[in-house]
Image (spheres, rainbow, N blue to C red):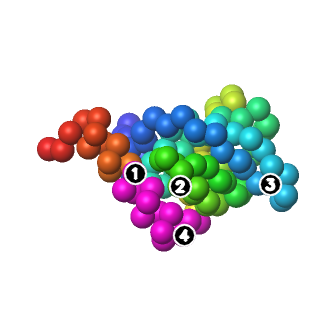
Amino acid sequence: MGYKRKFTRLPLACQGDLNRSGEIISCHVVDLSEKGMLLRTGTPLKVDEELGLTFVLGPSRRIQCTVKVVRLAKADFGAQIINISPDDQHYLTEHLDDFIASNFGRF
């Protein structure tokens, strides 16, 4: 039994909006990695469903991406980022690197 994730997920507490064919669903981003996240919402989602996601990362950077639901666990949904602009991906990566350096130090 091995570790399945390629990227470490870090805790995050921010609100987001999922877009399901024009229907806006409020969600909470629980944790985040370079390629995925754990979302919490009161609205049922389905595995393999693709949705637009917008959330604010850092002081004011709005991140927009497309996610695919890959795992369900009660009100939590594991999602993979399947489409994100290069600028938003770069900012996301830098934000996560800064978080690790600030909280765990550089080795």
Which tag, 3 or 4, sits closer to the chain's start? 3
Say which label, 3 or 2, has the lower sequence index: 3
| Vertical comparison of 45 with 74: above or below | below
Q: Nearer the viewer, mark 3 or mark 4?
A: 4
Residue type at mark 3 is: Arg
Q: Which residue is mark 1?
A: 95
> Would you identify the image quadrant in which residue 68 lies?
bottom right
Residue type at mark 1: give it.
His
Q: Which residue is label 2 attached to? A: 61
**Mark 2–mark 1 distance (CA, rounded to whole Å):** 10 Å
Residue under circle 4?
Answer: 85
**Location of mark 3 (residue):** 20
- Along the line of sight, the residue nearer the viewer: 1 or 64: 64
Left or right position of 67 against 49: left
User: For the point 80% across and 54% down, which residue is it?
Assistant: 20
Q: Is residue 50 magenta?
A: no
